[in-house]
Image (cartoon, rainbow, N blue to C red):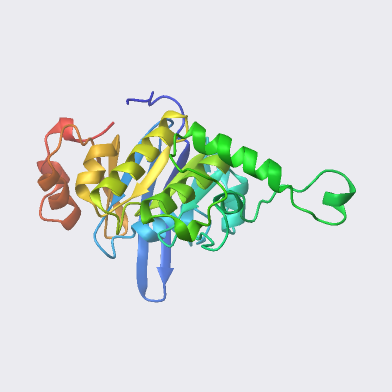
Amino acid sequence: MSPETSTPPVIQAKGLVKRYGQVTALDGADFELRAGEILAVIGDNGAGKSSLIKCLAGATIPDEGEIYLDGARAHFKSPIDARRAGIETVYQDLAVAPAMTIAENLFLGREIRRSGFLGSVLQMIDKKKMLEESIARMNDLKVGIRSMTQAVETLSGGQRQCVAVARAAAFAQHVVIMDEPTAALGVKEGNMVLELIRRVRDKGLPVILISHNMPHVFEIADRIHIARLGKRAAVVDPKHISMSDTVAVMTGAKSVDDLPPQALAH
């Protein structure tokens, strides 16, 4: 996909700095996610990618720099602020409740209350409506799970990941951030999750994908953001750069200046 570069980025960071004592995790990091794309974020350990993503997700407040959402300055003091702004994050630990059903997990922390006195005063949950909406949302994303009343602990690792991704996609209005969504999954289940990520993107939600799995990154990403030493080293086009050159830039073995112009994403 090649979104119009003239429209403002969906989310943008300029000059982010984050220090932890003597350690500088982010050293003037820039970032931009465009509408309708899957942007992969890669980097060695200590490159600053986790700190960058935590700033975008509201989990960390940067010491310096600015974050913009649709061109307007954003101030996230917590993950709840980012959620309210339409940014949903799927972390590696998934944050699913194994003993609860799929439908209950999809609405975890955002349960639908029953109408009238039962909901407003007695705080009773409308399980029927939650079940109906869960079925509709999973069908919409073509997630093939037989029953929404299954406990999540009965699902495979890939199916659990799909539940977490579907939950994020159901409530996100701007961005879905996914942290290593295919880690610890087999080939078949990893491909199932990748296909779901594509569907999320195709439904109009841009995706930030943090991953160490370079074959997956090259298979699914529209652009690749390379983090190095707390900064953005480059943004490259996976269609015009090799995996080895990408890794070389990521590790510092190769300079961005050594890349052919078409390798850099615009």
Q: Is residue 18 left or right of residue 107?
A: left
In front: 191, or 1? 191
| Residue at 34% over, 57% down | 49
* Location of residue 231 in the rendering, given as x and y in whole percent from the top left corner: 31, 54
Q: Is residue 128 left or right of residue 70?
A: right
In front: 83, or 260? 83
Q: Quadrant of the N terminus?
A: top left
All told, the count of numbered labels is: 0
Q: Quadrant of residue 131?
A: top right
* Location of residue 240 in the rendering, given as x and y in whole percent from the top left corner: 16, 32
Observer able to see residue 129:
yes
In front: 235, or 170? 170
* Location of residue 146 in the rendering, given as x and y in whole percent from the top left corner: 48, 43
Residue at the far bottom in the pictured view = 21
- Decide: is 217 above or below 136: below
Q: Quadrant of the C terminus?
A: top left
Observer able to see residue 173:
no
- Decide: is 26 above or below 119: below
| Residue at 31% over, 44% down | 40
* Location of residue 220 in the rendering, given as x and y in whole percent from the top left corner: 28, 38
- Decide: is 53 above or below 23: above
| Residue at 37% over, 76% down | 22
